[in-house]
Amino acid sequence: MKAAGDGVGAPGQRLAASARPADMRKGRGATANPAGRYEPARREAFDDGWDSDDELPRLRTEDVPERARTILTRNTSPDLPFDRSINPYRGCEHGCIYCFARPNHAYVGLSPGIDFETRLFHKPDAAELLERELSAKGYIPQTIALGTATDPYQPIERGHGITRAVLGVLARFRHPVGIVTKSNLVVRDIDILAPMAELGLVKVAMSVTTLDPMLARRMEPRAPHPARRLEAIRQLSRAGIPVMVMMAPVIPSLNDHEIEAVLERARECGAVEARHVLLRLPLELDDLVNDWFAEHYPGRRNHVMSLVRQARGGKAYDAAFGRRMTGSGAYADLIGQRMRLAKQRLGYADARLALRTDLFTPTAAKGAQLSLL
């Protein structure tokens, strides 16, 4: 066992020590399960000659409750169009290799790799906590972003229904909400979302990273098929719910050639806004994505990472406000220009749709009585 600070090898070999057999991790995005950055030790595989990989069980998803004291997370980032968010789940079974939330799993002593997509947490009291926070004296409503770190409609939502319960509270309070997802499960809640949309209280951002099913299966293995996401855009739009298509992330030399095609298909299905995010590689994500490329697209890895660094000031990641989402430099500018031209040609709205805050009803708590004052 090596100390966490021990050196590692070249990109693509750096996570070999924590890699899992391919058949064992079938249906998972990460190729390895490295120790989190706060762990005091790092495990290293050792071949004892018994070749017992075939005896290892297939990785299963574990799901345990997390008792939160608050549910609203605040931020002051100028890069984000919201200052508060809700994430009903920690970790995400979709397993998107590029997910910038992976490093957050280190805060609970777990790996940003396979642990992130197999060891999940749900917040069963989310709706009750939200009701309490919205009922607090002096609360000022602004749009809540639902699902900014992990997908609120990932597979375990089918059983827990936490996202649906949260939406029920927001609808009752007439509170604006923006939803970010890559799952067609969102159409289940059209009965809640459509009446909110009539009041200007909701919009949905649907992430469509590629139209290629094989690529989607490799980089986001348990997320719905791209065609299902496009159909979800169609159903939401028909119900009067405004939809933004998110080309996020744009990955150089992997899906960047699809920008125009994705925007065109989404527009045909009714999307009214479009945005993009350039691949972000904070903290452990740099090694994880490098290792994924080494397994799936070894011939492209160096070229991809070269373009990423060109757009990140020579680094794997630039966290500076104003640059972290879209990058800078020639490649980033080219992507931005292609997005602008495609949006203009296809008739996408240039400005973000603003949701209403003036309908907020702070007396909407269950059993609440109207004040006599």
Image (cartoon, grey):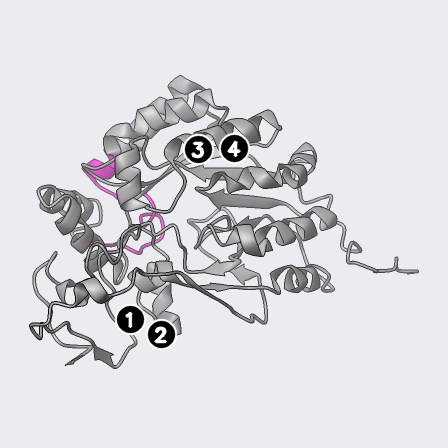
Q: Quadrant of the N terminus?
A: bottom left
Q: Earlier in the sequence, mark 2 or mark 4?
A: 2
Q: Which residues are magenta?
A: 315-334
Label placed on residue 243: 4
The residues bearing labels 2 and 4 have C-alpha atoms spaced at a distance of: 36 Å
**Residue receiving disc 3:** 228
**Residue receiving disc 2:** 109
The residues bearing labels 2 and 1 have C-alpha atoms spaced at a distance of: 6 Å
Amino acid type of the residue tagged 3 in the rendering: Arg
Residue 329 on the magenta segment: yes
Q: Residues within 10 Å of mark 4 (few under 14, many from 20)?
A: many
Q: Quadrant of the C terminus?
A: bottom right
The residues bearing labels 3 and 4 have C-alpha atoms spaced at a distance of: 15 Å
Amino acid type of the residue tagged 1 in the rendering: Gly
**Residue receiving disc 1:** 36
Q: Position of residue 129 (x, y in %)?
A: 64, 64
- Please give the name of the residue rendered at 11% of the width and 57% of the height, measured from the top-left corner: 11
Q: Is residue 47 left or right of residue 273?
A: left
Quarter of the figure with residue 120: bottom left
Q: Is residue 269 above or below residue 157?
A: above
Q: Earlier in the sequence, mark 3 or mark 4?
A: 3
Amino acid type of the residue tagged 4 in the rendering: Val
The residues bearing labels 3 and 1 have C-alpha atoms spaced at a distance of: 34 Å
- From the viewer's side, name the closer residue of 46 and 101: 46
Task: Please tell me whether mark 3 sits on a helix, a strand or a loop.
Answer: helix
Question: Could you tell me if the residues under marks 2 and 1 are in contact, i.e. CB atoms within 8 Å?
Answer: yes
Q: Position of residue 300 (x, y in %)?
A: 12, 41
Q: Name the mark nearer the viewer: 3 or 2.
A: 3
